[in-house]
Amino acid sequence: MRFRSIATGRLLWWSSLLTLLVLVAAGCAENYPQTTLEPRGDFARMVDDVFMTTVRWAILVFVLVEGALVVAIIKFRGKPDDPEPKQIHGSSVLEVVWTVIPAVILVMVAIPTIKVIFETAKEPANALVVEVIGHQWWWEFRYPEYGITTANELYVPVDRTIDLRMVSDDVIHSFWVPQFAAKRDVFPNRETRMWFNAEVTGEFPGQCAEFCGIQHGRMGFRVVSVEAADFDRWVAGMSAATEPVPVEGDSVALAGQQLFLTKACIGCHSFNAADPPPGQIGPNLANIGNRTMIAAGMLQNTDENMARWIRDPQGYKEGSLMVMAGEITEAESAALVAYLRAQQVVAPSTVAADNQ
Ligand code: HEC
Ligand SMILES: [Cu+2]
C-alpha cells in the first residue's frame, strides 16, 4: 500500500514536470504564428490587452493568497501540546472583506472588458469591405468595391481597416485570424461582422474555428498583408483577370488547358476573378499559379502537391466536394499543373516576411 502511494506520488511529480517542460518548449517555439499572444492588428491587440489585464490580476491574487497561506503554515504551525486556537467562525469583518475584495477585482476586470466589447462592436468608418463566404471546407473572399472574387488568400493593404461581412454557404463556420482579429461565427442565414487593421505586412494563417464537418481542421486560409502599392497592383491584376492566361507555345500546358475542359474542372472552377459565373462549387482559380498554398491553406503550392491534389483530392481531404468523375493519370496531372502554374495574373508577392 505504502509502496504504491510513493509510486503514484513520483508519477505525479514527473508528469507535472513533463507537462511544464512541454508548455515551456511550446512557448519558446519559433515560427509559431497561430497565436493570439503576439497580436499584429489593432483588434487582436485590444483583446490581448484585456487578457493580459486579467492575467495580471490573477497573478496578484495568486501571490497574495498563496503567500498568506505559506506564511500561515510556517508561522502558525501547531505543536503537539498547543492549546486550541481562537475560533473565528462567523466573523462579519472577515466575511465582508473577502467578499468586497474579489468584487472590486471583478469590477477592475469588467471595466476594460466591457469597453473592448463596445469598441470592437463599432462599425468602422472608411473601411475596405470584404465579403467572406464560408464553404465546406474553404473560404471565398469578395471585394465589392473592386468586383473581385478570390479564395483562401485574403489580400489586405497594411494599415487600412478591413470590414468583414460574413455568411456561410452551408453549415456554421467560424472565421479566425489569431494575430489580427478574433473569432466570429459565420452563419448560413445571417450576416456577422468583424473588422481588423493589419499593422504589419506578412502572411498570417487563419483557420475555421467551428467544427463544420470532418475536414474542419483543414479549412484554413492566409491573410496576406501588403503595402498599399502592392495591394493596388494585386487589385489591378485581379480586376483584369476575366479569361484564363493563354499558354500558346507550351504544348504541355496546352494539353492541360484541354484537360481542364474534358475533365470537367471547368464545371466547378473559373479563372474569372472579375465576373465569375454564379453557383460555382469550387474556389475561384485566378492567380492560382502564384498562391502560396492550395487546398484551403493546407498544402504548399508546389507542382508536386498540386499534382497529388488533382489526382486524389479525396485522399487528402476525404469528403471534399472536389469529386472527380474519372481517373487522372500522372501525365494528365502534370499537364494540368503546367496549365494552372501559368495562371499568374499578379507578380509573386513581395511580402516582407515580418512574421515568418
Ligand atoms: C465537382 C466540383 C469540382 C471539380 C469537378 C473539380 N474541382 Fe477542384 N475543387 C473543388 C472544390 C470544392 C475545392 C475546394 C476543396 C477544399 O479545399 O476543400 C477544389 C479545390 C481545387 C484546387 C485548390 C484551390 C485552392 O485555392 O485551394 C485546385 C488547384 C483545383 N481544385 C483544381 C482542379 C482541377 C485541375 C480539376 C479538374 C481536373 C478540378 N479541380 C475539378 C471542386 C471541384
Ligand atoms: Cu468551417
Image: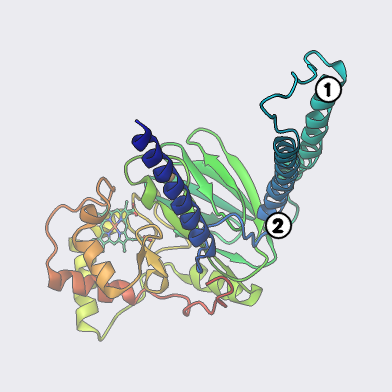
Marks 1/2: CA–CA distance: 43 Å
Left or right relative to 293: residue 191: right
Q: Is residue 275 left or right of residue 249?
A: right
Dot 1 falls on a residue whose secondary structure is helix
Residue drawn at point x = 37 percent, y = 52 percent? 218
Above or below: residue 337 compared with residue 96: below
- Asked if the beta carbon under badge 1 is closer than 8 A to the nearest atom of ligand 2, the reply is no
Dot 2 falls on a residue whose secondary structure is: helix
Image vertical order of residue 300 relative to residue 320, above or below: below
Who comes first in sequence, dot 1 or dot 2? 2
What amino acid is found at the position of numbered circle 1 in the picture?
Leu
Mark 2, residue position: 42
The residue sitting at the bottom extreme is 249
> Which residue in the rendered view is the most extreme toward the right?
93
Q: Residues within 10 Å of mark 1 (few under 14, many from 20)?
A: few
Check disc 1 and report the residue beneath it: 94
Q: Position of residue 1 (x, y in %)?
A: 34, 30
What residue is drawn where x is 56% and y is 70%? Answer: 355
Amino acid carrying label 2: it is: Asp
Q: Pick the residue in front: 235 or 288.
A: 288
Tell me which residue sits at (74%, 56%) in the image: 126
**How is the rendered protein coloured?**
rainbow
Kindly give the residue lying farthest to the top in the view shown: 90
* Relative depth, front residue between 102 and 44: 102
Number of numbered discs visible in the structure rendering: 2
